[in-house]
Amino acid sequence: MVDTPAARAVDLGCAYDLVVAADGASHLRVTKGAVSLEDRGVTAYVPATHEVEIPAGQHLGTPVSVTAAPELRAAVSRFDRSARADRAALADIVRLATPYDRVTLWNVIGWTRDPDAVAALEAVAPLPDPALRARVIAGDADAMDIWLDVFVDRGDQAHDRRMKNR
């Protein structure tokens, strides 16, 4: 674990670059494996080929693919700066997300439970069981973990976490 002024980075078996500026702003880029960023009870899952900007004094940011389009990055930045309250930015994220932006959508869903974001992610990464949809929208962490396993290979990590929580 590495503590920064913005969040705690929990190594989930990975390689990453973490830069912390003097004012506390942070930038994390994961090159292998994954990192769990944690701040005040909020967690962001950041796998390889994704990065996060955390402005000084802000809550953790939303992970984006290193290849994300500038328009999506701008929408994510607006969403993050608004403490995830900007509905127009959320709508732009949903509209602009491509199949390569599944992790961004997944993190957004975990924070907002937005049905449009759920539908957008379902279009590119269908839930393994349609009954999980209601659980995802209700904020069920196990359902979110199951869904993440559909499009991110986390090895035994997700299964181990689910078993520990029972």
Image (cartoon, grey):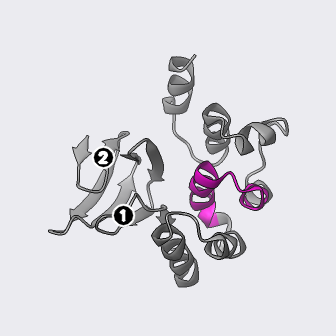
User: Residue 69: x percent and y percent?
Assistant: 55, 80
Residue with the mark numbered 1: 58
Instruction: Report the amino acid beneath label 1.
Output: Gln
| N-term-proximal mark, 1 vs 2 | 2
Q: Residue furthest bottom?
A: 71
Is 166 placed above or below 12 here? Answer: above
Residue with the mark numbered 2: 8
Is 36 placed above or below 141 here? Answer: below
Q: Residue furthest right?
A: 130
Identify the residue at horizontal 72%, vertical 60% (top origin): 117
User: Residue 157: x percent and y percent?
Assistant: 48, 31
Whole-angstrom CA distance, mark 1 to mark 2, is 13 Å
Report if residue 75 lies within the magenta region.
no
User: Residue 63: x percent and y percent?
Assistant: 48, 61
Badge 2: few (under 14), some or many (20 or more) residues near its Cα, within 10 Å? Answer: some
Q: Is residue 142 left or right of residue 42?
A: right
Is 73 placed above or below 147 here? Answer: below
Question: What's the magenta bit mostly, secondary-structure-wise?
Answer: helix
Quarter of the image for residue 150 reads: top right
Badge 1: few (under 14), some or many (20 or more) residues near its Cα, within 10 Å? Answer: some
Front: mark 1 or 2: 1
Quarter of the image that includes the N terminus = top left
Quarter of the image that includes the C terminus = top right
Instruction: Report the amino acid beneath label 2.
Output: Arg
Q: Which residues are magenta?
A: 100-121
Is 107 placed above or below 91 here? Answer: above
